[in-house]
Image (tube, helix red, strand yellow):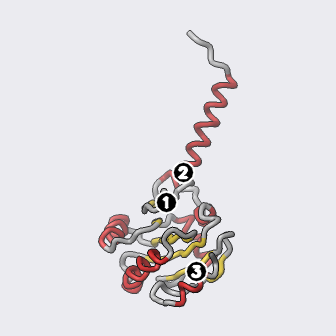
Amino acid sequence: MKKVSLAGIGLMFIMMLSINLQAQFHMLPPEGENTQIDLNEGRYSTLTFDKLMAQFEGKVVYLDFWASWCGPCKREMPYSAKLKKTFEGKDVVFVYISTDRNPTAWDKAIKSMQIGGTHYRVNKSVYVGMNERFNVKTIPRYVLFDKDGNVVDDNAKRPSNPQLVDDINALL
C-alpha cells in the first residue's frame, strides 16, 4: 500500500476546490453558442450581480432585463436577434436576465421565440444587486456597458431603435 502525504492530499483538495469554483462562476458559453443558467440552482446561491457581470469584462455588454410574461419584452426580441447578427464576430455580448419566477415559462419563452444568447433567471441575491445598482422597476430595461465593465447607459435604447447600433459601435 502506498503512503499519501498530507501535502499531496492538501494539494488535491485545493485543486478540486479551484475547479469547482471555476465551474460555479464561469458561465460563459463557448463562442457562438447559447446558454441558459437558472441562478436559483443551489450551486449559484452565493453569486452576486457584480460577479455575474465581471465575467464579461473585455467585451461590450448589452444587458436586457425581461420576463416571459412581458408583452413589450417579447416584442423587442426579433429586433434583438437582428441586432445580434449585426454584431456577430465582434466583442459584443448580449446578456438576458429574466425576472421570471416560473422556470418552465422562462425556458419555454426562450425556445419558442428562439432567443439566442446568454440567459440567466435571477436568484434573490442577483435580483437585489441589479435593483440596488439600476433600480429596475419596469421591464423591458436595457443597460449598456463598455469593455472595461463601466456602465455607459443605464437606460439604453431598445433593440428596435436603429440608433442603438451607433451607440454600440462607438464602444468597439
Residue drawn at the location 69% of the way across and 69% of the way down = 148
Q: In terms of sequence position, does the residue under pointer 2 or pointer 3 come before the other?
A: 2
| Residue placed most toward the observer, 84 or 111 | 84
> Which image quadrant is residue 90 in?
bottom right
Residue 2: image location, x then y, percent: 59, 12
- Residue pointed to by mark 3: 168
> Which image quadrant is residue 106 in?
bottom left
Does dot 3 land on a helix, a strand or a loop? helix
Q: Look at discs 2 and 3 and give the one toward the viewer.
A: 3
Q: What is the spatial separation of the Cα atoms under label 1 and label 2, in whole angstroms?
A: 19 Å
Residue 66: image location, x then y, percent: 45, 77
- Residue pointed to by mark 1: 31
Q: What is the spatial separation of the Cα atoms under label 3 and label 1, in whole angstroms?
A: 19 Å
Within 10 Å of the Cα at label 3, are there few (<14), some (14-19), or many (20+) other Cα atoms?
some
Residue drawn at the location 49% of the way across and 60% of the way down = 31
* Left or right of residue 4: residue 78: left
Residue farthest toward the front in the current orientation of the protein: 89
| Residue placed most toward the observer, 153 or 138 | 153
* Left or right of residue 104: residue 143: right
**Amino acid beneath label 2:** Gln
> Which image quadrant is residue 105 in?
bottom left
**Amino acid beneath label 3:** Ile
Q: Quadrant of the C terminus?
A: bottom right
The answer to the question of whether label 3 and label 1 lie on touching residues, with beta carbons closer than 8 A, is no
- Residue pointed to by mark 2: 24
